Image (cartoon, helix red, strand yellow):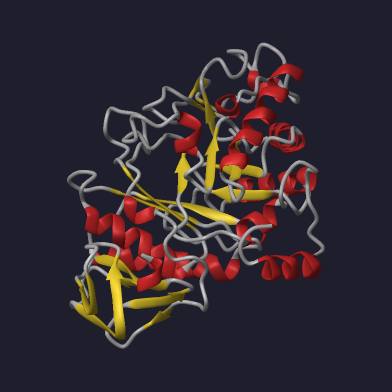
């Protein structure tokens, strides 16, 4: 193992975690525990500003990625993906090779498969299949941008099929778990998640897109939220995001893999918002962050830049983050201090006895100002 070997070994001994595959350096639980920070995830689409870098290298900069199975090379058996329960042998081998290549580049990487349950392309099922949701006898549009139709997961038989697909994803060996989009705490989703856990067991990770909401009825079955925070223009929005992130870190099941994303407001050069998102994730969670394009753009959703601010300069956390009397949140890491200053707060000043270097400005000093709606990593001189 790399890094804090003793800490990871203790986790493995305490919880009985063991290596899932002989060719991997450690299992998913250890990969989550042994990361260096900042830690960034990819939600479907790529960082596209590194034009001269090959695709897998850019992908492997992210510590967690989720996408549809075909992104990883897998193909379902049969004409209709929604009726399938296994992948072709050839595609499974391709997926395993991609997994191995990625883990060689980033041994802490986590791979999740998006599991469709709410909506799908019209090619997903036969046109007249009973699992399409209908109102007044007509199918219902789900995700309008993608032209997807709603699926009726209120049906027990369909929930069982979704759970069988989750099991196939996990048993393929390509994925560490699954991702569920459009998540809420209604009765049918609770029933679906219980069915999935029965099929895949306790160990695989389950990530769900709850936006900035809390879902107490399904918290014990989820390892993390994809917090797709499309509302982040006002101070109250950031308070809601912080409250949900803190709640998720306390209430979801271990290991927790909370993924916080906000969108730019003017351009990808809204660097204060990128830093605020990153430092909010760093100070109030052990999770992953992303700053990306807004969904309403005509380009694919969640495209983003890779920022130098995201290079793993902090190392490992030394303690939990703490709210300060000045309204900021601070957290100590091996190589420096992460500071998040919420929108609507006052400018805060952070002072040290010895010089530090700001990851935001690359200036070295003993005192730093962090503006509202911004954040910084104040690095120990040897960690520059």
Look at the image and tell me whether residue 218 can be seen.
Answer: no
Residue occupying the far front of the picture: 382
Image coordinates for residue 173, horizontal then vertical, percent: 74, 36
Judging depth in this view, the residue of 383 and 351 nearest the camera is 383
Residue located 73% across and 38% down the image: 170
Image coordinates for residue 107, horizontal then vertical, percent: 61, 48
Residue located 76% across and 44% down the image: 200
Image coordinates for residue 347, horizontal then vertical, percent: 18, 77
Give the number of callouts. Answer: 0
Look at the image and tell me whether residue 198 can be seen.
Answer: yes
Judging depth in this view, the residue of 335 and 18 nearest the camera is 335
- Quadrant of the drawing holding the C terminus: bottom left
Residue located 55% across and 49% down the image: 208
Where residue 128 sits, quadrant-wise, is top right
Residue 65 is left or right of residue 332, and the answer is right
Residue located 49% across and 61% down the image: 214
- Quadrant of the drawing holding the N terminus: bottom right
Judging depth in this view, the residue of 243 and 348 nearest the camera is 348
Image coordinates for residue 359, horizontal then vertical, percent: 30, 63
Where residue 233 sits, quadrant-wise, is bottom left
Task: Give the vertical position of 191 relative to 233 (above or below).
Answer: above
């Amino acid at each position: 193992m790399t890094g804090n070997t003793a800490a990871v070994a203790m986790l493995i001994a305490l919880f009985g975690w063991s290596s899932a595959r002989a060719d991997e350096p450690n299992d998913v639980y250890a990969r989550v525990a042994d990361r260096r920070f900042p830690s960034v995830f990819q939600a479907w689409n790529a960082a596209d500003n590194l034009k001269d870098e090959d695709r897998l290298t850019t992908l492997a900069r992210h510590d967690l990625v989720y996408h549809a199975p075909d992104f990883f090379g897998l193909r379902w058996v049969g004409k209709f993906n929604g009726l399938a329960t296994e992948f072709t042998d050839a595609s499974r081998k391709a997926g395993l090779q991609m997994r191995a290549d990625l883990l060689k580049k980033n041994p802490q990487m986590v791979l999740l498969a998006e599991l469709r349950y709410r909506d799908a392309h019209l090619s997903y099922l036969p046109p007249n299949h009973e699992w399409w949701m209908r109102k007044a006898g007509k199918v219902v549009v789900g995700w309008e941008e993608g032209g997807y139709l709603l699926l009726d997961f209120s049906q027990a038989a369909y929930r069982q099929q979704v759970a069988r697909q989750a099991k196939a994803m996990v048993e393929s060996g390509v994925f560490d778990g699954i991702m569920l989009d459009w998540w809420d705490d209604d009765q049918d989703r609770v029933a679906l998640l219980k069915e999935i856990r029965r099929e895949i067991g306790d160990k695989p990770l389950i990530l769900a897109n709850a936006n900035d909401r809390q879902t107490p009825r399904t918290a014990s079955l989820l390892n993390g939220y994809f917090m797709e925070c499309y509302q982040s223009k006002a101070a109250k929005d950031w308070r809601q995001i912080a409250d949900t992130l803190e709640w998720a870190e306390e209430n979801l099941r271990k290991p927790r893999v909370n993924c916080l994303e906000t969108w730019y407001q003017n351009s990808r050069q809204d660097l204060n918002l990128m830093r605020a998102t990153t430092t909010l994730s760093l100070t109030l969670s052990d999770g992953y962050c992303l700053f990306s394009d807004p969904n309403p753009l005509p380009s694919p959703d969640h495209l983003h830049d890779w920022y130098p601010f995201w290079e793993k300069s902090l190392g490992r956390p030394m303690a939990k983050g703490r709210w300060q009397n000045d309204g900021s949140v601070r957290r100590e890491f091996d190589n420096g201090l992460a500071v998040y200053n919420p929108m609507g707060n006052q400018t805060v000043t952070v002072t040290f006895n010895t010089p530090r270097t700001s990851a935001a400005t690359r200036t070295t000093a003993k005192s730093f100002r962090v503006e509202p709606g911004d954040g910084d990593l104040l690095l120990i001189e040897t960690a520059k």
